[in-house]
Amino acid sequence: MNTKTTLSITEARKKIFKIAKDIQKPSRYYTLTERGRPKVVLMSAEEFESWQETLEVMREFPDLDKDIAEVDRAVKSGEYKNWTTLEELLKEYGYILADKGKNKYNVSIKNRAKGKKATRKNSKNLSR
């Protein structure tokens, strides 16, 4: 434990406003103790939300480090140049891309090519 940011709950009560201000700094937190044992950790709401998002990503993509390494290898070898592009995928499902300056990928139902139906299943795949 970091003694500088470890306080008893009793002492933290006296300094709660100072602690609340201090934990707004990046990576700053306080460990509060009861009878010398860690009981609770205080951190900013922003830091807490960031941790929650990180944990959610780790749950959804458990092999993210391997996936990143695979993409790195593909970029170094040039293999990625053979991958399907977003434009190709959207054309396959009958969408037409609107070229609106910087926001090239502005796609809507209005821009879908006539005559080709995208099924509900295919539409769900595009939204992922």
Image (cartoon, rainbow, N blue to C red):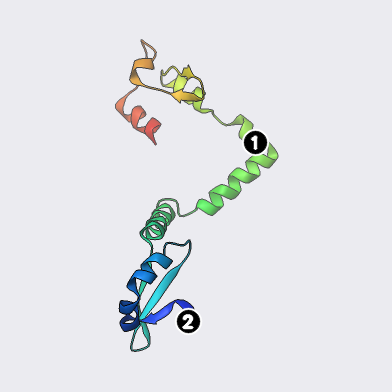
Compare marks 1 and 2 and give the one earlier in the sequence. 2
Asked if residue 107 lies left or right of residue 13, the reply is: right
Q: Is residue 128 above or below residue 52?
A: above
What's the residue type where badge 2 is placed? Thr
The residue to which callout 1 is attached is 79
Q: Is residue 77 visible?
A: yes
Residue furthest bottom in the image: 35
Indicate which label's residue lies in the foreground, 1 or 2.
2
**Cβ atoms at labels 1 and 2 below 8 Å apart:** no
Q: Is residue 42 visible?
A: no
The mark found on residue 56 in the picture is: none
Q: In the image, residue 124 lies at what x, y percent?
A: 34, 32
The residue to which callout 2 is attached is 3
> Residue at 51% across / 25% down in the picture?
102
**Mark 2 Cα-neighbour bin, 10 Å: few <14, some 14–19, many ≥20:** few
What's the residue type where badge 1 is placed? Glu
> Residue at 33% across / 72% down in the picture?
16
Q: Is residue 64 above or below residue 29?
A: above
Of 71 and 36, which appears nearest the observer? 36
Asked if residue 64 lies left or right of residue 122, the reply is: right
